Amino acid sequence: MKFIYVALVMVLTLSGVQAQQRQSINQEIQALKRQVIALNRDLYILEEDLLFPTNTQVAVYLSMDIGKFFELDAIELKVDGQTVTHYLYTEKQIASLKKGGVQRLYLGNVSQGDHQVTAIIRGIGPNQREYKLGASDTFTKDKKALSVELTIRDSLEKEQPIVEMVRH
Amino acid sequence: MIYQRLLTRPRTIVCAILSPILFSVTGAVAAAQSQVEHHISDLDYGVALYHYYQGNHEQALTELAIIEKQRTIKHQGLAPELVKGGMSLSYGLYEQANSIFTQLLSAQGDTSIQADAWFYSGQLHYQEANWLAATRAFSKVSSKLSNKHRDEFYYFKAQLALKSLDFEQYQQYKQLISDSSSHEPQELNPAHHYHQYLDHNHLLQKISAKQLTFADLTLSISGTNPEMIALADRSYLAMGYAFIEQGNSHAAINAFKQVSLDSYLFDPAILGYAWALSSLGLHGQAQSILNKLTSKPELNVYVQEALLAQAYASEQLGDEQGAVIKLTSALKRFKQQQEQLEVMQGLLTRGHACYNAMILKKTVADCNASQQFNDLALIELLSDTRFSTYQAQLQQVNQLKQQFKQQRDKLEIYQQMLIEKKHTAQARLGNIELATLKTQVVRLSEQRDSLVSRIHAAKGEDDGEFFLPAAQVAHQQKVTQALDTLALLKSKGHDVTEQARRLSFIQRLALWQQDYDYALNVNTTMQLLKQLNAELSQLLTSYQQLAKHVAQVANIDAELKQIGRLQDNINQQFRHSAAISERIEQEFAVALSDYFTQRQQQLQHNIAAAKLAVVQMQDVAYRPDDIGDANE
């Protein structure tokens, strides 16, 4: 009886120690994850400073509002007539945009002065037909970083999608 | 006799082997956000959400961390904090998530934020298997809870009701989960699976409460995706063994038949199927079914049981000699297995290089290719929940290690880039000392300023001498001296008329020359001054450019220092993660050693049983009916 009791206590203690060890490892993994995030952040800031300094930086974002009349498929972005990015969307990415996510479509450098940004957006429009949306505007780049937001929204009056380009 | 011994096996095996497989499942608990959010006014915050909604939690948290470091998020109130908590929870940063929710709940504010925070807090406790705390947190969730969390909330409530065996409440919450016919694709909406996970767990509760009926065979769990197929397989297997325990062999056969052929649960399903057939007296069919298992090269627990069950079936069919042959062959395989286990245990004590290969690569072939490790228990090991924690932890740590490595590589590229930039800047600077150049510029500027002021003063005072050459001034002085001498001679009575006339002529000539030189020198001086100004200004521009390069070099040096600090930090984290990985491997080695010991014991038990059966069948005095009667 005494033996069984001692054995039971030993088993319980051992399993307790194992659980504690596992807990401590989990906590250490969490600490590592936090470090990964902090280092990612510092690296990103450094990268931005080195590769895309504020006085030349241009960023183009894409967002969607509702998106009932348009099923996004692909986008082509041009800066001063040159294609800088061409993007094909997955279902997950489209769902993220519809939920309110914003995609950083392009991050690059331009000289100070006037620049033309053009977006050609392809997808499925009303009546399940292939649909092409286009938007173009000229922006003046100064010493501050230039952020341009492209928004695909539904025009309820026209019952068709529209795209807007706004400087932030 | 063997019948009784063998048929008691399923009951112990169901508990010992299947319990980890049939453990209740929580299913996909990732936040399902099917509702359309408001338009995000802060672009970078929107970018974080974009990654979050795709399940890329690390990138999402990084984006938030960048915003936090650089500025504040505009116009979003406490929502970003809530989202950060949700992201932290999804990324496995439970402590961070907990502190965010605690902070949000202690702050008086938006009731919908409070409701969501209580929901997340409940989810956190649920994931920690702290049912009481989870129940408490969920009970505080108000009706203001966001629509996007409602299905998940009812799912958790239903799961908790199941755990407390409150089936009435379970049904109520289950009904509140929206219909799975949502417009969103199934893989993007975990709510589609909530009903099915709940059905599975409900079934397990019924099994443990011994309330399983034939009607339960019509499972609602279905689907074409692998997750749902696996879930259905688990349900059917659990039902099959439960029906065997209940003595309902027909129902058991129906259940086992539903398990997919390519399922990892196929072996226990086949074994159960054969047992059910045997219990119906269909030993011939059972034997041919068992062949599927016994012909396998590996010797997992199901194959071991199948070898014994096959002998039993032969015995029941009156083929005692065949039974003995089967038992002898089984004994041979058991002993071979024992030897293999010893080899594996030997490998275990020599190192654990193969654990990584085994756990991370996940296939027998990969492991065999990397180490001389046989595939004996590999499949079992990989599917065993006892090792899944180590597997998950090792995978996580290895991923983190990989990330630290990538970060280090990235930093090396930046470092190289900056060093090149620094060299270019330094080449532009050449050997010029900026300080010396500055002193020169300052000195020249001072000289120029002094000259300008002297010119202005001379012009103002009409100082003719200032603009005359030294020889002319000396000549002028000589004339003045001669005039003084003539005046002295005249005063002493000398006639100096001729000398005075000649001196006057010389003086006039000198004055005329002076006037001419004055105009000429003024112009030349002004021109020289202009030139000096231009050169000085050029020198100043050069100096400014050089100063810019020097500042650039200093800036690069600061950035290089920062890179050095980051590199140190990364290296430290890398070493730390390697140490953690080593610790997990050690713990895993201990668990693996325990596992091998258990397998050895099991084998010894099977060897003893097989030997006993052989002895009994070969004993001339052995009469099954007598012993059967005696057993009864």
Image: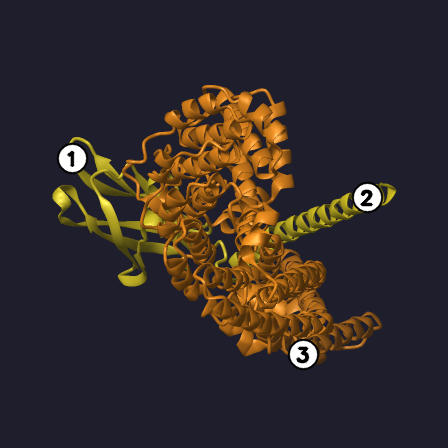
* Percent x, y of residue B243: 44, 41
User: Where residue A4 is drawn, which disc sits there?
Assistant: 2
> Residue at label 1?
A159
Viewer-nearest of labels 3 and 2? Answer: 2
Closer to the chain start, of discs 2 and 1, is: 2
> Residue at label 3?
B431
Image quadrant holding the N terminus of chain B, namely: bottom right
Q: Is residue A65 above or below residue B354?
A: above
Instruction: Identify the colour of chain A in the image.
Output: yellow
Few, some or many residues within 10 Å of mark 1 (<14, 14–19, 20+)? few
| Mark 1: amino acid | Glu
Few, some or many residues within 10 Å of mark 2 (<14, 14–19, 20+)? few
State the CA–CA distance, disc 3 to disc 1. Answer: 70 Å
State the CA–CA distance, disc 2 to disc 1. Answer: 78 Å
Q: Of A98 and A24, which appears nearest the observer?
A: A24
> Which secondary structure lies at badge 3?
loop
* Percent x, y of residue B317: 43, 61
Q: Of B71 and B519, which appears nearest the observer?
A: B71
Q: Chain of mark 1?
A: A
Image quadrant holding the C terminus of chain B, namely: top right
**Chain painted orange:** B
Q: Chain of mark 2?
A: A
Residue B78 visible: no
| Mark 2: amino acid | Ile
Give the side of residue B505 with respect to residue A96, left or right: right
Viewer-nearest of labels 2 and 1? Answer: 2
